[in-house]
Amino acid sequence: MSFSYPILPTGHLLAIEGLEAPHISALLDLAESYALLNRQGKTQRDLLRGRTLINLFFEDSTRTRTSFELAGKRLGADVINMSVSNSSVNKGETLLDTASTLNAMHTDLLVIRHSQSGAPALLSQKVDAAVINAGDGLHEHPTQALLDALTIRRHKGRLDSLVVAICGDVLHSRVARSNIHLLSAMGARVRVVGPPTLIPAECGRLGVEVFHDMRAGLDGADVVMMLRLQKERMSGGLVPSPREYFRFYGLDAAKLASAKPDAIVMHPGPMNRGVEIDSAVADDPERSVIGEQVEMGVAVRMAVLDVLSRDLRRNA
Amino acid sequence: MKPILITNARLLDPASGLDTTGSLLIQDGRIASLKGAPAEGADTFDAAGACLSPGLVDMRASIGEPGGEHRETIASAAQAAAAGGITTVAVLPDTQPALDDPALVEFVIRRGEATGSLTLLPFAAATKRCEGKDLSEFGLLREAGAVGFSDGSHAIANARTMRLALSYARNFGAMVVQHPEEPSLAGNGAATEGELATRLGLPAIPAAAEAILVARDIALARLTSGHVHFGHVSTAAALDLIRAAKAEGLKVTCDTAPPYFDLNETAIGDYRTYAKLSPPLRRDEDRLAVVAALADGTIDAIASDHQPRDADDKRLPFAQAEAGGVGLATLLGITLARVHGEDLKLLEALALLTHKPAKLLGLEAGRLAEGAPADLCLFWLDRGWQVKAGALAGKAQNSPFDGRALEGKVMATFKAGRRVFAA
């Protein structure tokens, strides 16, 4: 590659915040090449041969864990999935106990998902492995933002100056935070749209425009990115009811009509159909790129594993 | 015990405004003379120009004992206090068990006496087990030596309970110390609400959670004529309310703690759990308002807000880590930073650490006067040092000031005429 300095200088991928446009572009370019290889059915099984990748998931996840597993296996790594249930955490084993166990196993790459913001950062200070944040609390989900950006770039040819509306429960969304940082760094104009109870404090200071009216927020948008609304937040907690939420913030054809005619619709999954998104929109092949997001997820994760293992390979 | 003559000291008594170079004679545990007349057979201690002030009175701290001895014992807290120039500490009652029984109050006082270096004065629990429901035995607890009533770091959330506590405490001439944070608004928040908490994805507590409880309790102080004291006030909005209540003549007082005038929310950047405190560190506008309120007299005292934690309490993801920082060894140094920063005059700063808190607690301590107890703090005003968690006096090391460079260091501490610390 022509890129002359490390793409991920910290040796970990803990957050998008702090990455700059050249780093992000380099990752996306590499992911693009993996997407092509994947479509051609080619693999690179020698790249991570003999390397150990551990998927350490403290929260349930099927999609992200499978995506990392597939990415690791396509590059030839030995992939181990560890699901740590809350019960064993309650037994008193702390995150740092887990870290010392992982060090003893000589883990090369560690993918972690945790319900607490900052848990991957804490772990990265204590383990020898390169740490990849697969979602921490309300903080960040960097590979999701990268796969979203790759999907957008493939459809729009660029990220710069696109209008991207991120809609729904921004308050509890690590996907939203990572996307805000990434898209802003790449020169997109980011909007967040949602009821005031679901927009975090001083969100505007993250460099986004805040809208509480869905049609106004979608007006002229190139990309409409929907967020999942957790069930426990639907009934009186932060919004009064699913039906009221769908009426004002659910994406249906009528609201989508405010966006540009060629606007694409995205969702990180899993979807609550009839709550934040209407099935007719989610399944519309002309607008929805939700399936492609999943495909790009594997390519992006292959690119991240590739970049973070370069030091290991150089030292080998 | 032989008399001790401390010579060549800058004698500082904030209560009287004394600031002069001279000698101080200690005899029978009390200050015998400020005139410098040498006594027969006295040991001489050359202060070499250092400052000599009354021993510091820390009016609000938590100590690990009873119940949290793995974090800190009274003996180890006494070491930290002595290294910090502190000779009197009023301790909060939310220990295990809570100090809601006269025997427990007496126990803490005795354990303090046993250290030989520190007077411990307990606040008793305002409600049984600090649960915020039923009032404890104010009268009996007061007789046992309680200096006031509080539920420690639990806010007395129920307005009726607070009303009863204020009116009943008044009967015994005692104040009620409130942790001013509306719990239903604070929830399980870990940081102050705003841009930084949003970026870090941390559950947040709005600054208004403090102002709401302060406003409510001021109204209750008006209703009951009771004395409410707010601990660790940290926001501009709450200070404005307190300033107005004082102007109105209500019995409303407050303290703050060094983190709230020395640090702001950015100290928690990268999820630094040693800077996780309750209330959370605020934005810099609030910090500046605290500094201003120290200078204009709205704040009556600076307390250490000492909260010992061990490594297991802190080596956790930020929102799961325990709040609280140690503060005994750094109380003077951080306060002197505001003197060096020219926000406070030296005597004003010392007043907030000595006779003002002593007066709130009804003590004779905190004065450099003939006949007063010889509880003394001798310190170099300008000597530099660096706060290092792991190298602080005492057992607990969870300092939010880890790494902070300070000017102003304790040289020696005297308790009832006996030297209990020397640097």
Image: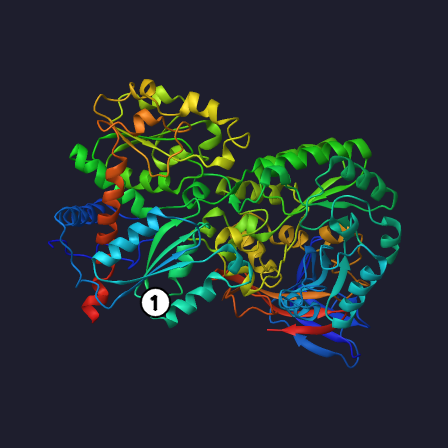
Badge 1 element? loop
**Residue shown at 45% from the left, 48% from the top:** B266
Tell me: residue B42, above or below residue A62. Answer: below
Q: Nearer the viewer, residue B209 or B361?
A: B209
Chain letter of disc 1 in the image: A
Q: Please indicate, yes or no, whether residue B116 appears anywhere in the rendered image.
A: no
The x, y position of residue B32, in whole percent, is 80, 68
The x, y position of residue B173, in whole percent, is 85, 45
Quadrant showing the N terminus of chain B: bottom right
**Residue shown at 72% from the left, 79% from the top:** B43
- The answer to whether residue B286 is left or right of residue B21 is left
The x, y position of residue A244, in whole percent, is 48, 22
Q: Please indicate, yes or no, whether residue B33 appears anywhere in the rendered image.
A: yes
The x, y position of residue A267, in whole percent, is 32, 35
- The answer to whether residue B77 is left or right of residue A137 is right
- Residue density around tag 1, few if under 14, some if 14–19, many if 20 or more, within 10 Å: some
Tell me: residue B271, above or below residue A189. Answer: below
Q: Nearer the viewer, residue B133 or B27?
A: B133
Quadrant showing the C terminus of chain B: bottom right
Quadrant of the image occupied by residue A149: top left
Quadrant of the image occupied by residue A78: bottom left
